[in-house]
Image (cartoon, helix red, strand yellow):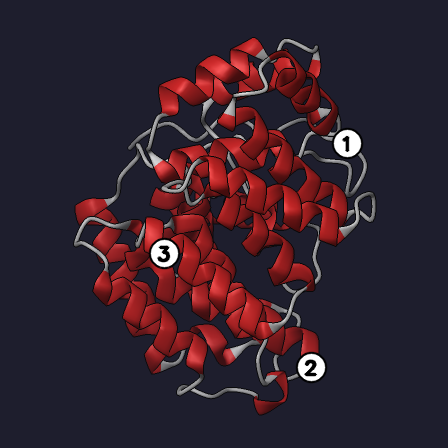
Amino acid sequence: MPPPPPPFGRARKRGAHAFDAALDDTELASARTALAQGRWTEVRSLLVATGDDWDRRGHRITVLAQEPGTAAWSREWRLAEPESADAAVLQACAMVFRALNGKERPDHVRKACHAAAALVPDDPTPWLSLLILECATGREEDVVRLFDEVRHRHPDHHHAHHLMVARLAERHAEAGQDPMHEVYDFASWAAEQAPADSPLAILPVIAHTERYRVLAAAGSEPLDVASSRHWTGRRARHVMNAAFDWWLEWGNEDHPRNRVDLNFLAHAKFCEGRPAEAAALFHRIGPHATPAPWSYPDRDPYDAFRTARNITLGTA
């Protein structure tokens, strides 16, 4: 049996625990630290090395863009190297997160993203940035259009599919448990369209979890997952078993958002009451927890993750 995962952070006040969006990407974490100190040349080198690995590029740019000083430092980068498409894409993405915090006008942000997209026609990342913005603030037709723009450039884009599932899950919250809900159809379709080794195979679990978030918030499901039948029905068992079997056969540790999938799958297995399977996933996650889905529907994600992990591994 492998050793237990390392301790998950230090004990602090409730809600004060930081989740590292870089996950297990140490090169990204290093470049982020350098950027916070004004050394944008390390980010430039990182993005050049990333090349057209679109999932990794999207992950790295969105993580960097969320840092408070990124908009300013990317602006400095553009002044020093006006021809840099990477600087333009990073600045536009940083503006998206500023807009979500009420610090940028959305119309200015959209212009910046479109200008960045024009510099790199094959790159889905500026369109991913727009999709992040519109999923939070935009109209349904805009979300669908932008998802299509991303998918046209990278059909298996991991982050874009997760965003689309979360948005679709929010439709018809009043309908309650509906096995025919469109989010399930979309997730199944995307998983079937993807190559056999694609992590989009996990997407039906993401859909099931996002729908729980919506139903619990609407009062259709208990806030306590242990009291909810959402995780133990026939459809739920089929979806989660298929995803776990895929992970055993194909699970790709090299994917930049691998830990996102593992957190969703561990959460689902814990809710389903399958501790042995959940334990294997917690070992793989290590310290790389993600706020979603542990925060669902309205929980402190650090406490929820730590409690589930400790119960599963017998260290509670």
First reached walking from the N terminus: tag 3 or tag 1: 1
Contact (CB < 8 A) between labels 2 and 3? no
Up-down relation of residue 92 to residue 236 (above or below)? above
Say which amino acid is labelled 1: Arg
- Nearer to us of marks 2 and 3 is 3
Q: Is residue 315 left or right of residue 235?
A: right
Q: Amino acid at mark 2?
A: Gly
Question: Going by the image, does 184 lie left or right of 241?
Answer: right
Give the SS element for disc 3: helix
Q: Residues within 10 Å of mark 3 (few under 14, many from 20)?
A: some
Q: According to the image, label 3 marks what residue?
A: 151
| Vertical placement of residue 196 versus 235, above or below | above
**Residue at image mark 2:** 219
Q: Residues within 10 Å of mark 1 (few under 14, many from 20)?
A: few
**Residue occupying image coordinates x 39% and y 80%:** 233
Disc 2 residue crowd, few under 14, some 14–19, many 20+, Cα 10 Å: few
Q: Which residue is mark 1?
A: 12
Please identify the quadrant where the N terminus is shown.
Answer: top left
From the image, state whether disc 1 or disc 2 is nearer to you.
2
Residue 282, placed above or below residue 49:
below
Q: CA distance from mark 3 to mark 1?
A: 41 Å
Q: Nearer the viewer, residue 83 or 277?
A: 83
Q: Quadrant of the C terminus?
A: top right
Q: Residue at x 45, y 25 (%)?
A: 25
Judge left or right: residue 82 versus residue 189: right
Residue 100 lies, in percent from the top left, at 74, 50
- Which sits in the foreground, 145 or 301? 145
